[in-house]
Image (cartoon, rainbow, N blue to C red):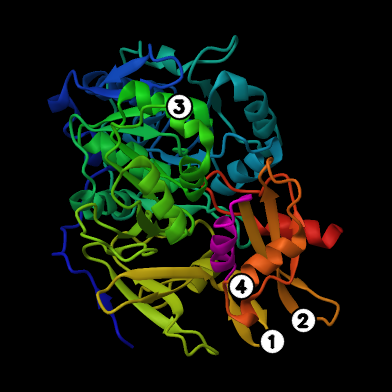
Amino acid sequence: MHVFHSDHPAVPTLDLPIHDAVLGDAAAYGDTVALIDGTDDTSALTYRQLDTFHRRIAAGLAEAGLRKGDVLALHSPNTIAYPAVFFGATRAGATVTTVHPLATAEEFAKQLRDSAARWIVTVSPLLPTALAAAELAGGIERIHVCDRAEGHPSVLDLLATTAPEPRVTVDPAEDVAALPYSSGTTGTPKGVMLTHRSMGTNLEQLRPFVPMGPGARILAVLPFFHIYGLTALMNAPLRLGATVVVLPRFDLDQFLAAIEKHRITGLYVAPPIVLALAKHPAVDRYDLSSLEYVVSAAAPLDAELAAACSKRLGLPPVRQAYGMTELSPGTHVVPLAAENPPPGTVGKLLPSTEMRIVPLSDSSSGHGEILIRGPQVMKGYLGRPEATADMIDADGWVHTGDIGHVDEHGWLFVVDRVKELIKYKGYQVAPAELEAVLLTHPSVTDAAVIGVTDDEGSEVPKAYVVRRSSAPDLTADDVMTYVAERVAPYKKVRQAEFIDAIPRATSGKILRRELRDRERNH
């Protein structure tokens, strides 16, 4: 079986605690602004403050009783306090489990129980959910808020502590720095054990491709709780002295205004934001001339949509990157310096990373499941040895569940998920390919495709489509005809339904499971 290797020289394994890997040079960046609150523009932290604050938070948590090996649940939207709490907790010896800010109390409690968390840090608007979750889960020692809430200790109080900074010995290869929960688009969410080494080494692998440093201004709208945001928008820029402008959620006008006001140079986004940048009329109202590049990841991005976005913004082609939570997350990236990368590619292998493409049993297309091996691989799923063994084989290869192929120059193209493929009369149909076609229709603003059972008991592709408000007359037949004219006969969409919005995870991934549930309830 052919093994693909990176074109780039190997990088050394980074055996440092993640707080040192990211903030080791913070004092040297001194008065450079590290973080700006993009919602009010008045709150900001310099690198010197971030360094001091995370050390005080570590001291305060240790003084309150946090010990090495404890799990702290960080339950917050993106704020300028998020990195200080994250690194303060790891410096005190904790593992940080990052929690979706919109999680219900029941979902949050499940994560608290599964991770055996004893500490919660939240924000006052989310405090009722955190309190309910803590009561459901049990075992929580303290709940801190990042701001102020009567009757609850605040992270701000920790900054005033005079306790000594804890001296905790970290084993970067074994100790778990972050415990994000994989999105659960395939099965129940599982705690992904990312060690200090796997996360730090992935930053080292990404460094040659990420043009960040003092003067670079990055807009953090993707959530820090998700590994893409944690790595690309928090750890990578803060490691290199860039300025991160932080937004708590994606609101198009607020997002565009922040780019204009803060002269943002780089965007790391997911496909729904690329779609908005390519098609939404609001984009023309803002000066986005400071932008130098756009990178998209977390879900497949159609090549034509990418081209429409870069043309409209007058930028080089939108670059894609590829990875998954279990891989800390990066394995492939299209280098910004690459001349004319082929449209639709998610990139080439990062340094020190290997890949195999294992053919699917019924495929002669050169497509296969993507397998990855490298120092960025997770330690495993917390408390789930069987699930870990299903994911990582005896030779250390991660079975990603994604299907792709590699061209003769080593560029990877991801087609779809193994579990998402629709089997139409023995042919394999990739939903992402049909979604890409649907998005080229001028009257369609968003679309998703799933496999449904037709009257004859066969699985067929069905499209859920969001109509443009200016095109109320678009019919299901129009949609099916449009696709039929552009794809092989076996790939045709055979049912179509209009819907107000496509359900998506915060990362931009389509939640096909919700659409399948909708089908079942019809």
Q: Amino acid at mark 2?
A: Ser
| Residue span colored magenta | 430-445
Query: For the point 31% across and 66% down, which residue is it?
Result: 342
Decide if residue 482 is on the left or right side of residue 50: right
Q: Position of residue 347 (x, y in %)?
A: 31, 63
Q: Does residue 123 appear anywhere in the picture? A: yes
Q: Are marks 4 and 2 in contact (CB under 8 Å)?
A: no
**3D distance between C-alphas at marks 2 and 1:** 7 Å
Q: Amino acid at mark 3?
A: Arg
Q: Are marks 2 and 1 in contact (CB under 8 Å)?
A: yes
Question: Of helix, strand and loop, which one carries label 2?
Answer: loop
Say which residue label 3 marks: 285
The answer to which of marks 3 and 2 sits earlier in the sequence is 3
Q: Quadrant of residue 293?
A: top left
**3D distance between C-alphas at marks 1 and 4:** 20 Å
Nearer to us in this view, 80 or 220:
220
Q: Amino acid at mark 4?
A: Glu
Label 4 crowd (10 A; few <14 / some 14-19 / many >=20): few
Rendered image: mark on residue 458: 2
Decide if residue 427 is on the left or right side of residue 244: right
**3D distance between C-alphas at marks 4 and 3:** 35 Å
Query: For the point 43% across and 51% down, which residue is it?
Result: 308
Query: For the point 55% across and 43% down, which residue is it?
Result: 506
**3D distance between C-alphas at marks 4 and 2:** 22 Å
Q: Is 358 within the magenta?
A: no
Question: Of helix, strand and loop, which one carries label 3?
Answer: helix
Q: Are marks 1 and 4 in contact (CB under 8 Å)?
A: no
Say which residue label 1 marks: 425
